[in-house]
Image: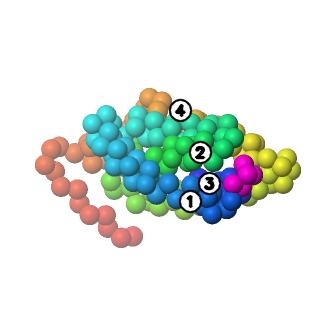
């Protein structure tokens, strides 16, 4: 995602459009991310979080594939809009998947750790995309890497896996979880 934030305008100007038009195309993510967050949330409630989260990652990978083939601002904007559908939806879906996997008592720690690491990955992605462009004169390598990471994420999230029930799921119905005591 860092690629889109940091490099899309430069990518689009490489297609021969002005920076204002490129920035306007980038703004379409705001609309599509709202639609995606609401739509993916609705689907997750009905189909389950993990398959919908995997679909969101796959869709984002498809968006990067569209950017790879883009030869005009129109095609690049379509790629952005596809990426935008999953832009904010994965945040809520990741929280839900984490709660299912690790339980509500551990959610703060797990979610906090994930979001402490994500900016590091996003920053490295922006830097690597810049290095790739400086080395090759093209964003193709960065787009291929982004696409592969999204498809890999979809596979990892979508695979069935052993699930140890969260501690609160082992309690009888109606039982109250005692609050954690500070150590």
Is residue 16 in the magenta section? yes
Which residue bears the numbered disc 4? 155
The Cα–Cα distance between marks 4 and 1, rounded to whole angstroms, is 33 Å
- The C terminus is located in which quarter? bottom left
Disc with the residue nearer the chain's start (2 vs 3): 3
Which residue bears the numbered disc 3? 4
Disc with the residue nearer the chain's start (1 vs 2): 1
At 23% from the left and 56% from the top, the residue drawn is 177
Residue 172 as seen in the image, left or right of residue 168: left
Q: Residues within 10 Å of mark 2 (few under 14, many from 20)?
A: few
Q: Residues within 10 Å of mark 3 (few under 14, many from 20)?
A: some
Numbered tag placed on residue 139 in the rendering: none
SS at badge 3: helix
In the displayed orientation, state which residue is furthest to the bottom: 182
Q: Residues within 10 Å of mark 1 (few under 14, many from 20)?
A: few
Residue stretch rendered in magenta on the structure = 13-17
Quarter assignment of residue 181: bottom left
Residue 3 as seen in the image, left or right of residue 59: right
Q: Position of residue 7 (x, y in %)?
A: 68, 57
Disc with the residue nearer the chain's start (2 vs 4): 2
Would residue 173 be seen by someone viewing this image from the given angle? yes
Of labels 4 and 1, the one closer to you: 1
The Cα–Cα distance between marks 2 and 4, rounded to whole angstroms, is 30 Å
The Cα–Cα distance between marks 2 and 3, rounded to whole angstroms, is 16 Å
At 55% from the left and 43% from the top, the residue drawn is 78
Quarter assignment of residue 34: bottom left
Which residue bears the numbered disc 2? 74
Disc with the residue nearer the chain's start (3 vs 1): 3
Compared with 148, 26 (above or below) is: below
- The colour scheme used to paint the residues is rainbow
Quarter assignment of residue 131: bottom right
SS at badge 4: helix
């Amino acid at each position: 995602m860092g690629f889109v934030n940091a490099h899309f305008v430069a990518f689009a100007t490489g297609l021969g459009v002005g920076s204002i038009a490129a920035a306007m195309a980038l703004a379409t993510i705001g609309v599509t991310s709202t639609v995606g967050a609401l739509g993916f949330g609705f689907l997750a409630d009905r189909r389950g979080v993990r398959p919908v989260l995997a679909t969101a990652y796959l869709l984002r990978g498809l968006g990067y594939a569209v950017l790879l083939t883009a030869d005009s601002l129109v095609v690049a904007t379509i790629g952005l809009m596809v990426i935008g559908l999953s832009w904010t939806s994965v945040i809520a879906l990741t929280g839900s998947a984490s709660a299912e996997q690790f339980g509500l008592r551990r959610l703060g720690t797990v979610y906090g750790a994930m979001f402490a690491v994500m900016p590091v990955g996003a920053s490295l992605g922006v830097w690597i995309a810049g290095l790739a462009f400086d080395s090759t004169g093209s964003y193709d390598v960065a787009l291929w890497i982004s696409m592969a990471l999204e498809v890999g994420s979809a596979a990892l999230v979508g695979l069935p896996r052993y699930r140890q029930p969260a501690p609160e799921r082992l309690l009888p119905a109606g039982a109250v979880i005692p609050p954690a005591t500070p150590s």
